[in-house]
Amino acid sequence: MTSDELQADVHAILAAEKEPKIDWAMVEAMCLRAIERLNTEGQPEYPYDLVYHFLDDVDIRRKDPSYAAVQREPITTWLTAPNN
């Protein structure tokens, strides 16, 4: 998995979570697919603690909107940083 592919996956997950009615089953599948790709295809350089936890915490974001907001802010910053 390349850095661009990882960023595209995370961007798609964020977009899905911005929908008025979030399809959490789809979001979870997207997160699990990204994790699987990271584990099998190799990992690009990325902020592991930030990105991996975002991908892994979909169940918590689903249950706790305030936690979701806290997680989305830094992941969005990472996606929009000029070095990415």
Image: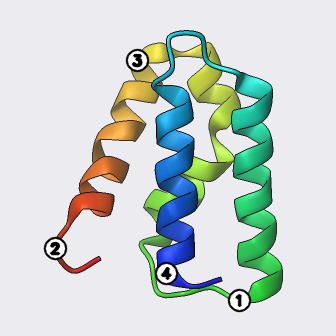
Q: Residue at x 47, y 77 (%)?
A: 4
Task: Please identify the residue farthest to the top as the structure is shown.
Answer: 21
The span from disc 4 to disc 3 (Cα, nearest Å) is: 28 Å
From the image, state whether disc 4 or disc 3 is nearer to you: 4
Q: Which mark is residue 55?
A: none
Vertical comparison of 30 with 40: above or below: above
The span from disc 4 to disc 1 (Cα, nearest Å) is: 10 Å
Kindly check if marks 4 and 3 are in contact, taking CB atoms under 8 A apart as contact: no
Task: Identify which residue, 80 or 69, lies in the foreground.
Answer: 80
Q: Residue at x 70, y 62 (%)?
A: 34
Mark 2 surroundings: few (<14), some (14-19) or many (≥20) residues within 10 A? few
- List x then y, in percent, for residue 25: 80, 28
Q: Which residue is denoted by mark 2 in the rendering? A: 82
- List x then y, in percent, for residue 78: 30, 61
Q: Which mark is residue 3?
A: 4
**Is 31 on the left or on the right of 5, as rendered?**
right
Q: Which residue is denoted by mark 1 in the rendering? A: 42
Mark 1: secondary structure: loop
Q: Which residue is denoted by mark 3 in the rendering? A: 66
